[in-house]
Image (tube, helix red, strand yellow):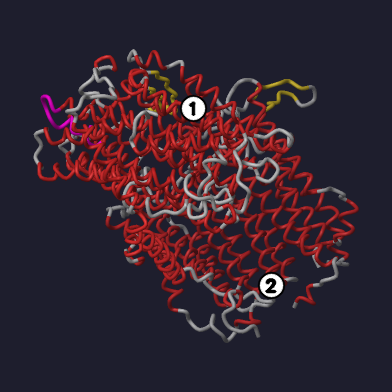
Amino acid sequence: MKSNDLILQTSTRVVFFIIFLFSIHIFFAGHYTPGGGFVGGLLMASAIVLLLLAYDFKTVKEVLPFNYLGMTAIGMLIALTTAAGSLVFNVPFFTHWYDYFDFPLLGKTSIHTAMFFDIGVYLVVVGITLTIIEMIGGDS
Amino acid sequence: MEIMMAILAGFLFSAATYLILSKSLLRIIIGTGLLSHGTHLLLLTMGGLGGKSAPVVADGVTVADYVDPLPQALILTAIVISFGVTAFALVLAYRTYQEIGTDNMDYMKGRGEID
Amino acid sequence: MLLFMAIVLPILLAIFIPLAYRSMKSIHTGWFVLLAPVLLFLFYLRFLSPVQQGEAQLARASWVPSLDFYFDIYIDGLSLLFSLLITGIGSLVVLYSIFYLDKTKENLGNFYVYLLMFMSAMLGVVQFDHTLALYFFWELTSISSFLLIAYWYKRDASRFGALKSMMITVSGGLMMLVGFLTLYVLTGTYSIRETIAQVDTIVDQPLFTVAVVLVLLGAFTKSAQFPFYIWLPDAMEAPTPVSAYLHSATMVKAGLYLVARFTPVFAYSEVWVWLVTGIGLLTLFWGSLFAVKQTDLKGILAFSTVSQLGLIMSLLGLGGFAYLVTGDAVETFTFATFAAIFHLFNHATFKGSLFMVAGIVDHETGTRDIRKLGGLMSLMPVTFTIAMIGSLSMAGLPPFNGFLSKEMFLDAVLGLLHADISTMTVAYLVPIVAWVASVFTFIYSIYFLWYTFMGSRKEEQLPKVPHEAPIGMLISPAILGSLVILVFFIPNVVGDWLVKPATAAIQSSSFASAADIEFYIKAWHGWTSPALWMTVGVVVVGFLLYKMLPKWQSIYSKWPERFTLNRGYDTLMDGSLNWNRALSDRFMTGSIRDYLVYMFAGMAILGITTLFTQGGFAISTEGLAPIRLFEIVLTIILVGSVMAILITWSRLTAVIALGGVGYTVALFYVIFKAPDLALTQLVIETISVALFLTAFYHLPKLDKHYKGKEDTSFRLGNFLISIAVGLTVTLIGISAYAQRQMTSISEYYKETVYTEAGGGNIVNVILVDYRGFDTLFEIGVLMIASIGIISMITLRLQKKKKGVTVDEIE
């Protein structure tokens, strides 16, 4: 999939980062406002898909040399560890915990174990989507 | 509105069923896509559509105002799953086509000639 | 807890057997296996004294305590007798197998795993006081028996015999399960003891007889009763230790156990007692008659086992009469039960030793064909001695234990004549049949002994040069053989410690404990004893008939082959196989589309019928959301896109229209206050379209094969099914909205989302917290899908590397 559309390529450079930042924002906002791991992950994936459309697979692979399958595995591991972590505290599997902390600069922030689980979901979604796209696109 | 949405979901199911029963692999895949849309709308409808506010905690919104969040959570899961399934089916379809040389369900069973 | 451990010990040990087999080739695996039965035998031996005092051993394991669902292990006299038989004979058989099976040639790992599995299963059958647990272990014995019969699975006959035994015993087991469930319906409990406790309330119900017959079918198939006995002769393809253990001493006695165990419940039914007695006698007669026809050593033993099982069965049936009569007759019939248990014990000893003898003969001469054998007495003197003890005991001669129990049997059948029961004319037949069967029992016992060990030697016909067996192989049969003699001289030791507690368990209405039973086993009843004269008659007539055997043995071949039970079984099996194939070929076409038609049509038909017949349909116009212009526009767009997909022949149009549907649905989500869904749907639709477009490169054009062909022609059937499916969904949707039966769990989520879960977005909190399991599995599913995709694509790439390209394939 070789593409030489100059306008698309130039705008993609900007748009990619906007979507990327939006994806991060929507991920962290997810616990209180619309968003979350799924949407965040999908947005991130769509940003990379946009890159793939504007450039070709090779270039993108050089810029973002991720092993997406590995990313999926790490995500799955994080999700599972978070879920199983509650067992250490002698509470049932998948019991979450949260509290509020005062961080310098950030102010009063809540730390929630559910967020770690969501990070796992995020990584899995990004990993899966791009694995699939890469596989199909890279298959000639 | 709910009745109209139920009819709409039924329509999507009809169209999906018709496509799934056709012979072309691609149409079958598209059919499964429609089927999941129909299911999602049906789930949403069953939960009731009359809520005043999105199920997000905000100032000035009471508990009674939220729409039912449970169908939404179910649908969210279903959307992502159906994406995975569609992708899988697509690859299965085109790999089958490459190996067998046809995407016609009937020829795959050896009925009729490949032209 | 120890009792549960004891049951599972063999199966736990079985886990390590393949390991031991592989890593320690030099030691015969059997030595490790031997540990389990010996330990367990000693373990159960400890219970002898308390059980004899009437203290049954009890252990309870709760499964679902809140539903009052628990399993009890209950060891009374009957269970203990069986447990000791299982572990005791088990030890001897394992010891014997160590010398019988060659450690270099046989796959011992498999053999002992199956054998240990059987041991656990059999212990479970006789110890659990729970009908479902009993059924579970019952079938497990069938399965391990299947595996053991097919141990030499390369032989056709082994596989055939294994399958036959499995088909018959498992189908009987299923009947038994239905019988148990019927009992559960009647009593509301799975516990056998509780069923016994409330027997008064159930005997008069019509379902009671149904349960009786069904449970009996289970017992009859397992214990090889007429006409189900046909699997047992074919099961003789198993290695001889297995035949000795499963198919004579223990597994086939599970049916007897079942009958004995349920006697306190079912004996109130006349159907039960007459069926058990009648079928038992018929089997006794039939088995002994056909044993003389056999030419295979193990075949003779198989039929003799069938016949002896029938004998015990009929005695148990006679014992059941004790529940129907009053007065003096009760004692006569409880005596029958006493005799049954005693003979069950005796049979295990002499038949076990005989099977081992047959194994030795087979092992040392290379054949079990009685026509080739003969004159082995001088070559194998020890084996001959054991065989003689076993055979003569089986024939019912003194001084062996078989004599005692045979006398008791004859006494018991004669006792029927003195009892006052309704169907007296039939009762006269019983002693006659019993006597004739005894004559044939005598004949086949002598036949077995004489033809193998006496007469002229035919060494030229034997595949091997015969010689005496190694000492290790002789230990087990010798122990059993000495028991046979020992029991004759001290029968009341066995009677007091084993037989009486078991009898007390069966005749629980007559005896509260073993101490109440006052039977005394005597070898000599005086000259006036009718049983003695019957025995004398048996010996005289039997001996005469045996002498004339060559003259009348040919009558067996007169019976037309077409009408044998075995032929019936074959016809039934072939027939059902063909019929099933014809049936499934009709609808299992292999075409996915056909299957989908079944599914969709089924869904529509079942859905609509249920909805209207069960009064499920309802329309409610209450609280409906208003329809606004924007929604109407969206609906029109959606319908339009779907129509476009349906009619287009361009795949690009189809995919773009599908995208259109997706985006419209996303807008619907916006209207219906589902921001998360709208966001997700929008993004995923974008990625999906990209995905479809990437995949296009690989897919054919839609119109390549179809345009102008079948799909444009209006397929009425498909269309109708589609409409029906859509209608079903609509109706269900409307009805579901109209009938809310209880508050949704969402109310809980809404109220606790901030206080309990510390979140604001309820949907997301449901996903990651309340229902996190769903999400966890969902990403699991996604991962599986992607692994599937990767393997589909990369596998092909590897093939290409080997030089085969797709083009070449095409």
Judged left or right of residue C759, residue C49 is left
Image quadrant in which you'd find residue C687: bottom right
x, y percent for residue C328: 12, 24
Instruction: Report the disc number at residue B97.
Output: 2
Q: Is residue C173 visible?
A: no
Please identify the quarter of the rendering in which residue B56 is found.
Answer: top right
Residue in front for this viewpoint, C391 or C338: C391
Magenta extent: C317-329
Residue type, label 1: Gly
Q: In the rendered structure, which amino acid carries the disc numbered 2?
A: Tyr
Q: Position of residue C114 (x, y in %)?
A: 56, 40
Question: Which class describes the residues within 10 Å of circle 2: few (<14), some (14-19), or many (20+)?
Answer: some
**The C terminus of chain C lies in quadrant:** bottom right
The residue that mark 1 highlights is C88
The numbered mark 1 sits on a residue in which chain?
Answer: C
- Which residue is pictured at 65% across the width and 85% down the height? B115
Name the subunit of mark 2: B
